[in-house]
Structures are given as C-alpha cells and as structure tokens.
Amino acid sequence: MTWCEAPGYWLGHEVLQNYGCRIASGLLVTIELVALSTTLGCAIALCIALIRLKGPAWARGAMAAYTTFFRGTPLLCQLFLIYYGLGSFRPFWQSVDLWWFFREPFYCALLAFTINTAAYQAEIFRGAIASLPRGQIEAAKALGLSRFQLLRLVVMPQALIVALRPLGNELITTIKVSAIASLVTLFDLMGATKLAFARSFDLSIYLYAAAIYLALVEIIRRVLALIEAHLTRHSATDNPHARAL
Amino acid sequence: MDYYLSLISFGPHGWGRPFLEGAFVTLSLAVATLPFGLTLGLAIALMQRSHRRFARGFATVYTTVFRGAPELLTLYIIYFGLSLGVQSALKSLGFSTQFDMPPFLAGMIALGLVLAAFSSEVWVGALNAIPRGQREAAAALGLHRAQAFRLIVFPQIMRIALPGLGNNWMVLLKETSLVSVITLPDIMFYAMRANVVTKEPFLMFGVASLIYLAFSIISAVGFGVLEARSNRGHAMHGAAR
C-alpha cells in the first residue's frame, strides 16, 4: 500500500482508498495550476495597475477594457474561449510553432486562470496604490528619488500591506474556481474526484474532496493572517481600523 | 463575414434565438436565487451576532464551509445528493419511478447556499454600522424587537449593504454559467451546443461572453443608480467618491 491509499484505508473507505493516488495527484495539479497562475498573474497585474495609473491615455483605455472584460464574464466562458476557441485555429498555431501550447488542457487552463486573476489583482493593486497619500509621492520626488526608487522604497511597501488581504481572498477564489479545469478534461482534484464518483456512484467521495479544498483554503487563510500580523507589527494599535492606513 | 453573421442571426439556421432563450434562463436563475440567498444570508448574519453560542457556532461553520468549497463541487453535491436522496426516499415508500433532479432547482439551491455565505459577511458589516443607541431608543419607545428591526434597522442596513450586495449579484450572475454542466439550458449550454453543431467555438463562446459582459455592465450601471438614489440625503463623504 502506498502512502496515498493510507487515508482511505484508515477511514475504512474503499473508494477513497482505490482512488487515493489519483486524488493526491489531482491535488498536486490543482496546487500547480493555482501557484503558477497566481504568481504569473501577480506580475502581469502589477504592470496593468501601473499602466492604468501612469500610462498614456490609449494604454489606460486598453487596460480598463481588459479588466472590464475579464472581470465581467464567467471564467468558464473564458476557459472555453481559450481551450476550444483558440484551439480551433490549429493550422495557425502550427505555423507559428505554438500548437504544443494550445493542444494541452493544462496550459489552456493555466492561461485562462492567469489572465483572469491578473484582471482581479490589477484592480486590487490599483486601489492599494491609489490609497496612498499624495504628499508622500511629492515628498519622495522632492528628495530626488527616481521613479523606480519611489516605487520600490515608498509606494510598494505600503501598497502591499493594504493589498495583502484582498490578494489573499483572490488566491482563495482562484483555488475554488480552479475546479472548473476539470471541465476541459484535466484531472485536477475535482477531475479525479469526478472520475471516482462516475465509477463508484459513491457521493461521499465528493464530501472528502470538499474537505480537502476546505483544508487547503483554511491553511492559506491562517498563513496569510500570520504574514499580515508580521508585516503590520510596526503599526500595532488597539484600533484595528488604524492598521489599514 | 456573411456566413458568420448568419450563424448568430435569428434566422432558421442562426443561433440568435437559442442564445436569447439561454439569456432568459440565466437571468431567471440569477433572479430566482437572489431572494433565497439574501434572506438566508441575513438570517446567518443575525445568528453570527446572536448571544447564543450555538447560533454563532453554526453561522461560523456555515460560512467557512460554503465560502471555502468550490461552487462546482457544491453544485454537484446538491444535484447528485438530492437526486440520490429523493430516489431512495421514493424507493422506501414503494415507488419505483425514476427521479431526475431539475437542474434549475439544484442550481438555485446550490448557488443560493453559496450566496448566503458571502452575503452574510456584507450583512454583518452593515449591522455592525448601526449604533447601539438606536436599538435602545427603539426599546424605550416601546417597539418590540421585530418591529425595531423592520422599521429602524433594516431600512438603514439596506443602504449600507447595497455596494456589497451589488458585488454578490455580479458574482452570482457569472456563477450561473456553472449550472450549464448539469444541463440547464442557459447561455453557456447553448454556446456549447452551437460549438458542437457549427464547429465555430471562438465565435460562439465569444458571443456568449459578450452577453455576460452586457449583463455585467448593465448591472454595474444599475447598482450605481441605486446607490446614488439610496444615498440621497447622505451626501457627506461616501457619495463623493
């Protein structure tokens, strides 16, 4: 018996034991998808937020359209638009040597989740950066800081504290919505569970999957609370609302 | 170009009419779920602030579970769980008829339970914003608790909760697309079917996303108007933003 069959064995749950290894590897796919898309999305989101705050008018408009579109349509629709829609232009992708990317459901899901979470994260960063008092930026400029220094030393350290909680919520949302990757034939945690249910018709397997998702979300929530407490230790006051500023 | 336009037209081979029907089903599901989810959410919020430990514990467990589990998983559990449950209940009563859970009802229950969990947070925030003194004043005037809630607290929390509930509505509108996977004939369902028939996935899912986008933009504008209306006479700082 391998380690991934153990939980099912201990619980005396035959289906969980038989599909334990598939569910474990599905969990790994879910974690990979979420970790990669959140990280890539974060980098893209920062660029979008900066363009929306400081860029030329046409770029600001384009970025506003991007965030409106990807926040205003269901992720399921975006995933299908990429996996089936872009995937249908096979001759084109083959001619530019990108077919290997659009052929794989994993890459399509990764792309869909990345551009979707980037749109949401961009709005979070934009709000956080805009919440800083104007005087600080003027003061930094008066001190002769370059634009990059201003960003690195003054804006980002404060904006990240404001953004941390909503970014954490966005990470949790991404974990939850990643379940729809199972609808493009990907065996993530949800996909593996669906397979186990389809073959056994044992509904309790879904409850175990829900418990795994809940555990994942709860662990992240706790870790984020610790990080937030660490980052805001300098401004510890009795008034919880004072921390936001 | 004419070919593509004919595909999404209202003509005999166009998918315009199915998309319109799908849009109606999507809206119906969202509108039907809203009162159920918001009422349950308010009840959970009142439990969260209750003096009874059991009620508070239940509210915490409820929100943790339904905010943490993927909506798709919740939908499957409700759909298959109720199907199998009713089936075995019928069997034990001696009926041998096949029972199929209506996808609309399953979607309404699943999305309503999730909406309740998320909206309860909004309700709690709004309830916390009502000063304690108002309740004491209401009690001093001889109103009993239900009257105080209906006449004094509720009209005020509606105004405070409106932006948060607007967000809940937008999320709900997009989440209804999940119910297409248990064969509810909504926008997504017809887009998938049109893709199978016409082999034009980019066009069909593009049209579907534009319909959702239109709904989202209309909702955003609508909530903007509602918020402006409900903030009449409160134009201190909030409204200026």
Image (tube, coloured by chain):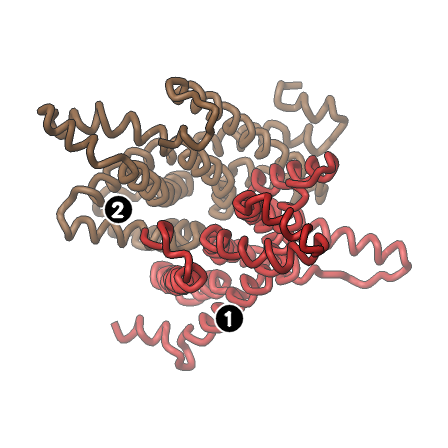
Chain colours: A brown, B red
Q: In terms of secondary structure, where does tag 2 sit? A: helix
- Local packing at callout 1 (Cα closer than 10 Å; few below 14, some 14-19, many 20+) is some
* Residue at point 39%, 21% (across, down): A235
**Circle 2 residue:** A94
Give the image quarter of residue B94: bottom right
**Amino acid type indicated by mark 1:** Phe
* Residue at point 41%, 39% (across, down): A106
Which disc, if any, is residue B24?
1
Q: Where is the C terminus of chain A found, in terms of image quarters?
A: top left
Query: Separation of disc 1 and disc 2 at Cα?
Result: 39 Å
Is B131 above or below relative to B60? below
Q: In terms of secondary structure, where does tag 1 sit? A: helix
- Local packing at callout 2 (Cα closer than 10 Å; few below 14, some 14-19, many 20+) is few
**Amino acid type indicated by mark 2:** Gln
Q: Where is the N terminus of chain A found, in terms of image quarters?
A: top right
Question: Which percent across, then down, holds residue B229?
Answer: 42, 64
In the image shown, does A70 or B235 lie closer to the viewer?
A: B235
Question: Which percent across, then down, holds residue A103?
Answer: 36, 44
